[in-house]
Amino acid sequence: MTGAGIFIRDEESEFVLGKTLTRRGILTVDEGEAWDLLQTLTWLSDLGMNKVDIEVDSMNLRNALQNVNVDLSVFGDYVSECKVLLSQNCLFQLGGLIEMPINWHIV
């Protein structure tokens, strides 16, 4: 089993809402990070949340999100799905390791 915990904080960093998820099977660390982000983006979209800053602490995931090359692995599939959700909601912004803007328009 693979699990994830997602939580939302307000502008004062106070806890607002949380969710835990489990998935059958074993994922690598990178796959788990990408799956977690995908679940987070899907949940935020389902909630109708906008103007959201998302914190990502995986350098491999950040690099993959910025990479335009196609990755046919399980990790690459999750990353591609994340890119689609990010491109559909321009108000989602990633924070975390790299303090530089990311262009989410997929070519």
Image (tube, rainbow, N blue to C red):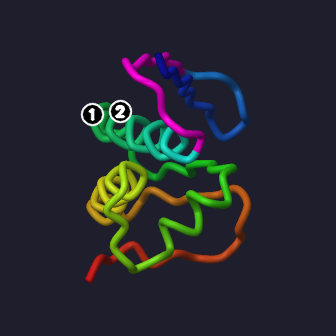
Q: Is residue 93 above or below residue 35?
A: below
Q: Which amino acid lies under the numbered mark 1 shown in the image of this protein? A: Asp
Distance between mark 1 and mark 2 Cα atoms: 5 Å
- Left or right of 39 in this view: 17: right
- Left or right of 23 in this view: 106: left
Q: What residue sits right under mark 2 in the picture?
A: 43
Viewer-closest of 42 and 10: 42
At 42% from the left and 51% from the top, the residue drawn is 75
Q: What residue sits right under mark 1 in the picture?
A: 46
Percent x, y of residue 102: 52, 75
Percent x, y of residue 26: 47, 26
Q: Are marks 1 and 2 in contact (CB under 8 Å)?
A: yes
At 54% from the left and 27% from the top, the residue drawn is 6
Task: Read off the magenta span.
Answer: 17-29
Give neighbour class at mark 2: few <14, some 14-19, many 20+ (Cα, 10 Å). Answer: some
Q: Is residue 45 above or below residue 59?
A: above
Q: How many marks?
A: 2
Viewer-closest of 105 and 71: 71
Give neighbour class at mark 1: few <14, some 14-19, many 20+ (Cα, 10 Å). Answer: few
At 50% from the left and 74% from the top, the residue drawn is 66
Viewer-closest of 17 and 105: 105
Residue 22 image label: none
At 73% from the left and 36% from the top, the residue drawn is 12
Q: For mark 1, give the secondary structure.
A: helix
Q: For mark 2, give the secondary structure.
A: helix
Q: Is 23 one of the magenta-colored residues?
A: yes
